Image (cartoon, rainbow, N blue to C red):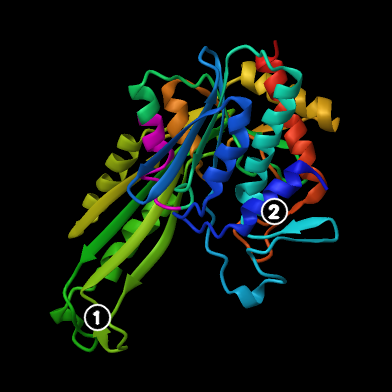
């Protein structure tokens, strides 16, 4: 057993389904208080957030993560209670084991390891913890960043504990993410009887050619850091449930994950251009979840790569693939941001798990990054 495993298990026991924190942040604050971390508990709306800092000078290396988890799904489909952590065959099972309570536990024990050896380190150590990452992400990290900016508190390097690894711990570091832009489209027609189509106007028939064109667009070919921009229809709905009624309206939800080759304004303009060219009667609302960001080669990337090599003996790959993370709120402040955490194969799934042996390794990697950037 290890301190990291013990803390991870204690966090998993807390039923912190988004936006609930269930006392996780208080536990973390109390654990780090004797080491000189000053705690700010920040509640926005129904979301609990925590900012911890040790030190008053720059540069600031901050660990960022979330205590909220997605709902477990049907409990009877789990091999064990999702909120009663169990170890079987070298794996720790429980909701949040991989995403991302193990990382948070490793944050804490890495700080303890580092401070035991470097009590007079340079700069400052921060922890930015939210309970809103798995939810709408409105009252979480984005609000804490605004609060920090209002105090002129700057994060220089940010290590997000999202599960970035693919096959083994540390094989992938996320040094950026694509932007995410969603559209909610409603195409209006005229309801009628299927036997009298001349007396109706079928919005499905009208919209399909436009949707086909949008799905076929080559938005760009990506670049050396990002894959190509992709357009995906996430949902489509029409009809009354009766097989003899032409619907009066079609609802479509779509999403674009876009590279730095695009802007959200350019994407919106192109979509409207296509819809207008097909003479549709429509309404379209947009939601921008985040712009693409990239942390190029620099101190944080170099320290993370070197730490992984030092502790695991393996090299790592840089990637910008995958979904969004709260790094999208921190990067625009000018901070260097990378994501490094456990293997992500089981996240959000039934029987989510993480390798027990990886927990202490992750803590040691985080501590080595601290040493390389803030070691006195």
For the point 41% across and 42% down, which residue is it?
140
Number of numbered discs on residues: 2
Picture quarter containing residue 118? top right
Residue at (36, 29) in percent of width and height: 147
**x and y percentages locating residue 178 in the rendered image:** 49, 38
- Residue at the left extreme, as displayed: 199
Q: Which label number is shown at residue 246?
A: 1
Mark 2 element type: helix
Q: Residue at x 70, y 60 (%)?
A: 85
Q: Is residue 303 left or right of residue 46?
A: right
Quadrant location of the C terminus in the rendered image: top right
Within the image, what quadrant is residue 371 found in?
top right
Judge by depth and name the residue closer to the eye, 295 or 152.
152
Instruction: Examine the rendering and report whether any part of residue 255 can be seen.
Output: yes
Position of 202 with respect to 137 (left or right) is left
Could you tell me if the residues under marks 1 and 2 are in contact, i.e. CB atoms within 8 Å? no
- Sequence-earlier tag: 1 or 2: 2
Up the image or down, 222 lies above or below 344; here it is above
Query: Which residue is label 2 attached to?
Result: 9
Q: Residue at x 60, y 42 (%)?
A: 162
Q: Residues within 10 Å of mark 1 (few under 14, many from 20)?
A: many
Range of the magenta residues? 135-146
């Amino acid at each position: 057993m290890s301190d990291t495993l013990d803390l991870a298990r204690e966090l998993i026991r807390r039923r912190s389904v988004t936006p609930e924190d269930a006392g996780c942040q208080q536990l973390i604050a109390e654990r780090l208080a004797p080491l000189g971390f000053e705690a700010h508990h920040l509640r926005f709306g129904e979301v609990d957030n925590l900012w911890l800092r040790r030190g008053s000078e720059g540069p600031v290396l901050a660990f960022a993560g979330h205590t909220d988890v997605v709902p477990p799904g049907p409990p009877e489909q789990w091999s064990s209670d999702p909120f009663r952590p169990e170890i079987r065959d070298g794996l720790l099972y429980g909701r949040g084991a991989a995403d991302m309570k193990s990382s948070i536990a490793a944050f804490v024990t890495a700080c303890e390891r580092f401070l035991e050896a470097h009590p007079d380190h340079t700069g400052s150590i921060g922890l930015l913890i939210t309970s809103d990452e798995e939810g709408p992400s409105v009252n979480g990290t984005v609000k804490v960043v605004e609060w920090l900016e209002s105090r002129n508190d700057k994060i220089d390097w940010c290590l997000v504990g999202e599960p970035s690894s693919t096959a083994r711990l540390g094989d992938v570091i996320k040094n950026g993410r694509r932007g995410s832009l969603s559209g909610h489209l409603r195409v209006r027609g005229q309801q009628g009887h299927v036997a009298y189509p001349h007396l109706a106007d079928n919005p499905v028939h009208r919209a399909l050619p436009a949707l086909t064109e949008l799905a076929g667009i080559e938005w760009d070919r990506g670049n050396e850091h990002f894959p190509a921009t992709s357009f995906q229809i996430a949902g489509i709905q029409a009809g009354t449930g009766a097989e003899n009624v032409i619907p009066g309206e079609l609802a479509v939800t779509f999403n674009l994950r876009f590279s730095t080759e695009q802007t959200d304004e350019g994407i919106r303009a192109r979509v409207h251009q296509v819809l207008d060219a097909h003479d549709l009667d429509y309404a379209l609302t947009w939601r921008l979840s985040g712009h693409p960001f990239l942390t190029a080669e620099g101190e944080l990337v170099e320290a993370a790569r070197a730490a992984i090599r030092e502790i695991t003996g393996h090299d790592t790959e840089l990637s910008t693939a995958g979904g969004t993370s709260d790094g999208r709120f921190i990067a625009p402040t000018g901070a260097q941001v990378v994501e490094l955490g456990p293997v992500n194969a089981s996240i959000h799934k039934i029987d989510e798990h993480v390798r027990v042996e990886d927990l202490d390794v992750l803590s040691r990697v985080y501590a080595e990054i601290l040493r390389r950037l803030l070691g006195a």
